[in-house]
Image (cartoon, rainbow, N blue to C red):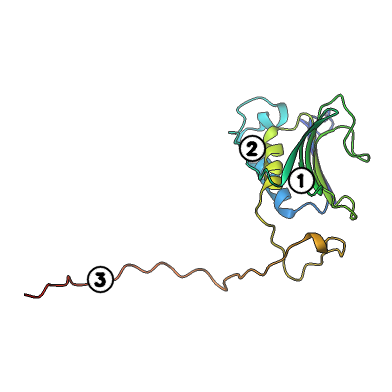
């Protein structure tokens, strides 16, 4: 699977920026990215296309420092997971892409590539992509929130040792409405 999101002011206009989503990128990441893009296109299309106007409020990205190591070498800046299976990398425009098969126009690389399995998925952004799209994807990648999949989902055999599974219970219906507090109990009296 491959999805390309391109920003142009008209069908025949030059490309302003693009996002490339490939492999089996988590549906939650793709949905978050597209939701953020749609919201900002509605609220401030000039910011999305031209980089002018009010940028969305930025926020600090939290991550578990026990799971990620900083990387800064050869024009690359970012984070590499301690197990070596995932990365968030920014490449300055004057350096070579970090992945041999990468599109050289991509500046941001957010990817999962478990050892022995090869690239599982990747999301890349060109240099002039609005930063709120990069932040949304990086926040999803750094999140410790587990991804939920149906029990019937087929997992490639090579990934099985890398995945922890647990059963979750989903209620059959909507939660019961809260009950109003009952009548107050009469005060106790002390004996004489």
The residue under label 3 is 183
Q: Residue at x 79, y 29 (%)?
A: 127
Numbered marks: total: 3
Q: Earlier in the sequence, mark 1 or mark 2?
A: 2
Left or right of 110, for residue 119: right
> Looking at the image, is mark 1 or mark 2 nearer the viewer?
1
Front one among 7 and 57: 57
Residue 93, horizontal then vertical, whole percent: 84, 26
Disc marking residue 180: none
Which of the pair 3/171 is nearer the observer?
171
- The Cα atoms of the two marked residues, 2 and 3, are separated by 50 Å
Q: Is residue 72 visible?
A: yes
Do tag 2 and tag 3 residues touch (Cβ < 8 Å)?
no
Q: Residue at x 73, y 49 (%)?
A: 30
Cα–Cα gap, marks 1 and 2: 30 Å
Which mark is in front, 1 or 3?
Answer: 1
Packing grade of label 2 (10 A; few <14, some 14-19, many >=20) is some
Tell whether 15 sits left or right of 57. right
- Whether 152 is drawn above or below 37: the answer is below
Q: Position of residue 164 (x, y in %)?
A: 73, 63
Front residue of 190/92: it is 190
- Quarter of the figure with the C terminus: bottom left
| Above or below, comparing residue 140 to residue 77 in the picture | below
- The residue labelled by disc 2 is 40
Q: Position of residue 101 (x, y in %)?
A: 93, 41
Q: Quadrant of residue 158?
A: bottom right
Question: In what element is the residue under mark 3?
Answer: loop
Q: Is residue 162 left or right of residue 62?
A: right
Q: If you read the primary sequence from the N terminus, does the residue marked by circle 1 or circle 3 appear first?
A: 1
Say the numbered circle drawn on residue 81: 1
Instruction: Quote the CA–CA distance across marks 1 and 3.
Output: 56 Å
């Amino acid at each position: 699977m491959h999805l390309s999101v391109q920003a142009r002011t008209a069908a025949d206009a030059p490309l302003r920026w693009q996002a490339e989503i490939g492999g089996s990128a988590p549906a939650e990441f793709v949905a978050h990215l597209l939701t953020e893009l749609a919201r900002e296109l509605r609220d401030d299309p000039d910011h999305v296309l031209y980089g002018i106007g009010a940028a969305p409020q930025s926020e600090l990205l939290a991550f578990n420092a026990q799971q990620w190591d900083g990387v800064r070498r050869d024009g690359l800046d970012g984070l590499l997971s301690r197990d070596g299976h995932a990365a968030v990398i920014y490449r300055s425009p004057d350096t070579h892409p970090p992945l041999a098969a990468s599109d050289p126009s991509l500046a941001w690389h957010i990817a999962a590539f478990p050892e022995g399995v090869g690239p599982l998925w990747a999301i890349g952004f060109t240099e002039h992509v609005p930063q709120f799209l990069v932040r949304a994807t990086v926040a999803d990648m750094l999140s410790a929130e587990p991804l939920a999949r149906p029990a019937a989902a087929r997992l490639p055999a090579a990934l099985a040792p890398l995945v922890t599974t647990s059963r979750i219970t989903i209620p059959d219906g909507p939660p019961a409405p809260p009950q109003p507090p009952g009548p107050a109990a009469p005060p106790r009296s002390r004996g004489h």
